[in-house]
Image (tube, rainbow, N blue to C red):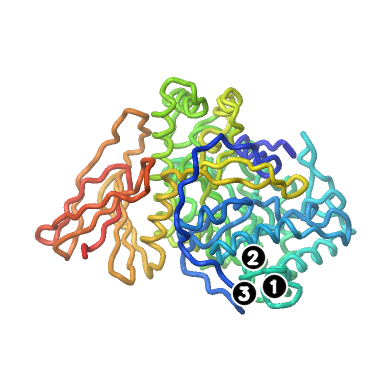
Amino acid sequence: MKRLVLSLLGLSLLGLLAVAPACARVPAATTLAPAVPAPVSPVPSGTEYPPFTIALEYAIPGLAAAYAPTGVTYAKPQPIFGMWGLIEPQPDQYNWEPLDSLVIEYQTAGFIGIQLLITAESPWASVNPPSLLNPGNTFPKEEYLDDYAAFVARFVERYDGDGTDDAPGLLYPIHHYGIEREFSGFWPGSAEEYVRLLRTAYPAIHAADPQADVLLVAILMVDVFDGNPDAAELRRRLTTPQSGIRKSVAEIRTILAAHDAYDIVDFHSLGDYSEIPATVAWLKDQLAANGADGTPLWIGDAFSMSALLGYGDRQAWPATAGTRDRVMGTLKRVADPSAAGHAEAKAWLYAQMASGLVKKIVVSAGEGLLGINIGNLEDWKTSLPAADALSVPLVGTSMFMGMMDSRLTGQQVGDRLPGYRAPGRPRPAFFAIKLVNEKIIGFTSAEKLDLGAGIWAYRFTMPSGPLWVLWYDDGKLYFPGETPPAVTVDLAFDAANALITHTPTKNGTGDPETRVLASSGGILSLLLDSTPAFVQVAP
């Protein structure tokens, strides 16, 4: 690994970026027809982004065509591909080929939108280049600040699609650029140094591409908003930092105050979906206090479900101190194919991922976010059962978040960069993202409904008519062999019949279960459980 950071989950993420662990041997791939035709040149003069975007997180070589059938057309490559020191290993010596190839692979597969991160880490330009056990300081040395600005400008010019110095074969312009990865151990410097870096990069980006949007370094506050705390608990958490997970609240406020140098606020959602509304509300309050009302928010990195364990010696909602040992035992069974109960534990995890993915996307859309990058495209485990089992207390579910099976091919990309993967069998989360993308993309308005305690419900206005997405959550975690509770809810419904589509949670072809349900007297009575249901007027 490139470095150690205080956050243990961050350690897992960093291991992915720097080492890219192998995936387990996988079954034969399932052949799926591409959702969109491959785009063709020339590069369009501009790209219109929709009001809400679903994106794939941590795009990696070899998997673009396999993920195209989800219908998702936006992706963010692994951040290491945008590292200054790997693209410009020596002053004025450039190696763009790995990033060019990755961008063009995904654009050719139909991903017309790409979000790129630019990181200042450099072996020759950083104040203190990171090394093993040394987080360093990646801020540029004073004598190289102008070189950093020039690199950023060259980076954006290469992918803006204006016909000047563009990457060979570029199919679509790229207009979304993030400055640094995450405001945690991934940025070892101070808030003030980050703001200075941001104010160096921002004018360079906009000079190269006036259509560009700059994303603030991603804010991570999972320890604060985990489990959607009440007001008193939230105040306590905001004044009691969790060592190793994030920067202080004062530092977060410092970077948010620099709203003259960013266009979009990025935050990470690595916990349960229930953290999203409270996080959004707090960030909007901070922006309003700085006179930056209306600044759009984007979740730049989201697991499909809570990590359950990690972040040091603690659990993440909906895991509790009382269920921690059961969580650990279940995930260790997932990690070890020879363990008794492995198949049941893995099926349980895959179902949790599929349901959680839909919940995170729906809540993000319903809360007015501009987009969400959701992962992962592959597992982050080593495929050594003993080692993976030992990692469970440190990183929880995060090592199993791949939406399909995959394996390493042995084809390398470049120094320190992840190599090519070969796709395998899609998992339920793959078909879940396909379903939610088909159902909600294109909505014109969204409304959160209050239908009772534990009921999450959003109503989307679609061109074809209203769409409701609903589920029930009593705040408890249910394990393999346990059945989560269900409740009946009455939904005001004008049509005679409703088409109910259930989120796919089992391995198979991915065709979601559907049924038609009759309403009575303008009321649709629905039995809701923890799996999201999509409700529309029946054809």
In percent of width and height, residue 173 lies at 63, 71
Residue 247 visible, this angle: yes
Q: Are marks 2 and 1 in contact (CB under 8 Å)?
A: yes
Q: With 473 as the anchor, is 431 left or right in this view? A: right
Residue 224 visible, this angle: no
Residue shown at 13%/62% (left/top)? 522
> Element at badge 2?
strand
Residue shown at 83%/51% (left/top)? 126
In percent of width and height, residue 84 lies at 78, 55
Q: Which residue is mark 2?
A: 214
User: What amino acid does circle 3 point to?
Assistant: Ser
Q: Earlier in the sequence, mark 2 or mark 1?
A: 1
User: What is the crowding at mark 3: few (fewer than 14 residues within 10 Å), some, or many (at least 20)?
Assistant: few
Count of numbered circles in the view:
3
Q: With 323 as the anchor, is 461 left or right in this view? A: left
Q: Which mark is residue 41?
A: 3
User: What amino acid does circle 2 point to?
Assistant: Val
